Amino acid sequence: KDIEFIRSNYYNKLEIARFDSNVGKFVGYTEFGVKQAEYWNNNPSYIGAMKTQRETYCLHNVGIWYGNP
């Protein structure tokens, strides 16, 4: 439960939007990022794909970081 998938989108070194697997949706941090987040959040297949990234990427590699040496 402590594993978290975060995908951040940047433009000109400024974070415009972020997907957090604990929140389950995109959050915008700039005017453009809010518009993009609304667009991405209204696409259920894209949100579903981002939610499965936690299982696909994070949980698959958890043994590398927390496994036995």
Image: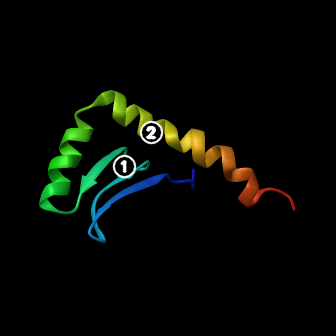
Residue at the spot 75% in from the left edge and 55% down from the top edge: 64
The answer to whether the residues at label 1 and label 2 have Cβ atoms under 8 Å apart is no
Q: Is residue 42 above or below residue 16?
A: above
What coloring was used for the rendering?
Answer: rainbow
The residue that disc 2 covers is 51
Sequence-first disc among 1 and 2: 1
- The residue lying furthest to the top in this view is 45
Residue at the spot 17% in from the left edge and 63% down from the top edge: 30
Q: In this view, does 5 lie above or below 42?
A: below
The one nearer the camera, 23 or 35, is: 35
The x and y percentages for residue 16 are: 25, 61
Q: What quarter of the picture does the C terminus occupy?
A: bottom right
Residue at the spot 31% in from the left edge and 62% down from the top edge: 10
Identify which amino acid the numbered label 2 is placed on: Lys
The x and y percentages for residue 18 are: 33, 56
Residue at the spot 31% in from the left edge and 29% down from the top edge: 44
Quarter of the image where one finds residue 31: bottom left
- The residue lying furthest to the front in this view is 12
The crowd level at tag 2 (other Cα within 10 Å; few <14, some 14-19, many 20+) is: some
Identify which amino acid the numbered label 1 is placed on: Val
The residue that disc 1 covers is 23
Mark 2 residue element? helix
The x and y percentages for residue 15 are: 29, 65
Count of marks, rendered view: 2
- For marks 1 and 2, give the one nearer the viewer: 2
Quarter of the image where one finds residue 32: bottom left
Mark 1 residue element? loop
- The residue lying furthest to the bottom in this view is 13
